[in-house]
Amino acid sequence: MKQPKKVTFQSNITVAVNDFPFLKKLVEKLACQSENNNVKPFTITADLVSTPVSTIEAYLNGSIVYKTKHSKQEVPFGSCFFFTCIHDEDGSNHLNWCHSLS
């Protein structure tokens, strides 16, 4: 009985945003927003303290390119994304994002 031949696919996925300078400015604005609104963390309970966050929804468009050894597919996208910046007590920022399915 013949053994099945193992097939390995190598692929590459790239995402390009059409207006990247806009996205960069948006993220920088989120990082600075908590400094501008003067909202300080406050204690909720003895072991729970609030965390300052900034959030914004933005419409982005671009393309997703899927390449394999034998083909290349480019698919345009346009969708809303939610960006949230969490501001830590030490002054660092953590950016999270998610895609809106609506």
Image (cartoon, rainbow, N blue to C red):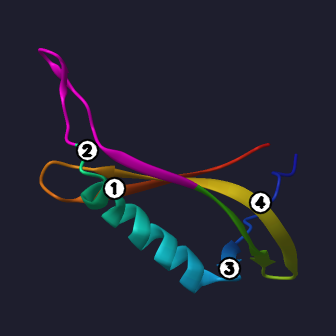
Q: Which mark is residue 79?
A: 4
Crowd rating for badge 2 (residues with CA inside 10 Å; few <14, some 14–19, many 20+): few
Instruction: Name the amino acid type tagged 3.
Output: Ala
Crowd rating for badge 3 (residues with CA inside 10 Å; few <14, some 14–19, many 20+): few
CA gap, disc 1 and disc 2: 18 Å
Mark 1 or mark 3: which is in front? 1
Quarter holding residue 13: bottom right
The C terminus lies in which quarter of the figure? Answer: top right
In magenta, the rendered stretch is 40-56
Q: Which mark is residue 16?
A: 3
Q: Residue furthest top?
A: 45
Task: Using the image, determine if residue 48 lies above or below residue 37.
Answer: above
Task: Using the image, determine if residue 56 lies above or below residue 66.
Answer: above
The residue located at (67%, 78%) in the rendering is 17
Judged from the image, the secondary structure of the residue bearing numbered disc 1 is strand
Q: Which mark is residue 94?
A: 1
Left or right of 41? Residue 22 is right
**Relative to the observer, which residue lies in front, 78 or 29?**
29
Residue assigned mark 2: 39
Instruction: Name the amino acid type tagged 2.
Output: Val
Mark 2 or mark 4: which is in front? 2
Left or right of 40? Residue 16 is right
Residue 59 position, x and y percent, is: 71, 63
Residue 20 position, x and y percent, is: 59, 82
Quarter holding residue 52: top left
The residue located at (14%, 48%) in the rendering is 89
Instruction: Name the amino acid type tagged 4.
Output: Ser
The residue located at (41%, 51%) in the rendering is 54
CA gap, disc 1 and disc 4: 22 Å
* First in residue order: circle 3 vs circle 2: 3
Quarter holding residue 47: top left
